[in-house]
Image (tube, rainbow, N blue to C red):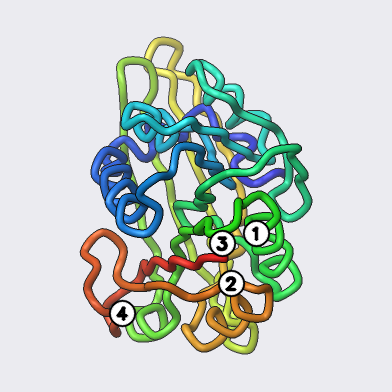
Amino acid sequence: MTVFGDYSSYYNLLYKDKDYAGEAGFINDLIQKYSPDAKRVLDLGCGTGRHDALLAEKGYAMTGVDMSEEMLSIARTQPLNFIHGDIRAVQLDQKFDVTISLFHVMSYQTTNKDFIAALQTAKAHLVPGGVFIFDFWYGPAVLTDRPTVRVKRLEDGQIHVIRLAEPVMHANKNTVDVNYTVWIKNKKTLQTEEIRETHHMRYWFLPEINYLLQKEGFNVLDNGEWMTRKKLNFTTWSGYMIAGI
């Protein structure tokens, strides 16, 4: 089963409370600081394209890549350039000023091999002097405030959604299996659908990220707590990294 494959149509509802506008503004601020002349941006793991649409409003020429055709079918309702591809292997015949990878796409790269392949993709599509911005699960915080069972309930005019998340940690792999069970009830027909998916996630530590970035020819420019830009700490579940070539 493809991650996000079955419930991609419910994805935007599940994350309707996510501050996409604030995050796009945050990314724009980082781009303006580290690549102020940037015009072309490649989003690796674009999902339904909500960040891309908001960044396009700020004047960037956006291209998004995702491996989920279901997610891209939603993204393509917007007049932007979206391409089906695996961020570990996709090869586009163009270069960009900035590559981004958001909403923990890099934490879905659970092996060093996959992470390095994604870094190589980001680098291969950057112009000289370009920058790569991504977020990730930060290990010290994950181990301090460990994942717990969570329930999320949302609804719109057509459906009611309940999502149960049950995490299983693998200490010797620095990974978490997030086992999702999603129940979708059609308000009109009262029919209920159940979907099960497991998302494999990796939490990262700065020394290993810095090492892998430098190994692939990046210069580490900045890191911090996602959205706040505070120094990474034991309460920072979500961190960001900026690297240049």
Identify the residue position indicated by label 4 in the image.
232
Which of pointers 2 and 4 indicates the residue nearer the eye?
2
**Helix or strand or loop: what does disc 4 sit on?**
loop
**Residue at the image point whose x is 63% and y is 39% from the top:** 65
| Amino acid identity at mark 2 | Phe
The one nearer the camera, 154 or 76, is 76
Relative to residue 178, is residue 144 drawn left or right? left
Q: Verify CB contact (< 8 Å) between mark 4 and mark 1.
A: no
Identify the residue position indicated by label 1 in the image.
123
Q: Verify CB contact (< 8 Å) between mark 1 and mark 2.
A: yes
Q: Verify CB contact (< 8 Å) between mark 2 and mark 4.
A: no
Between the C-alphas of marks 2 and 3, the distance is: 16 Å
Position of residue 97 measured from the top left corner of the image (x, y, whole percent): 52, 47
Which of pointers 2 and 3 indicates the residue nearer the eye?
2
Position of residue 125 measured from the top left corner of the image (x, y, whole percent): 66, 49
Identify the residue position indicated by label 3 in the image.
106
| Amino acid identity at mark 1 | Lys
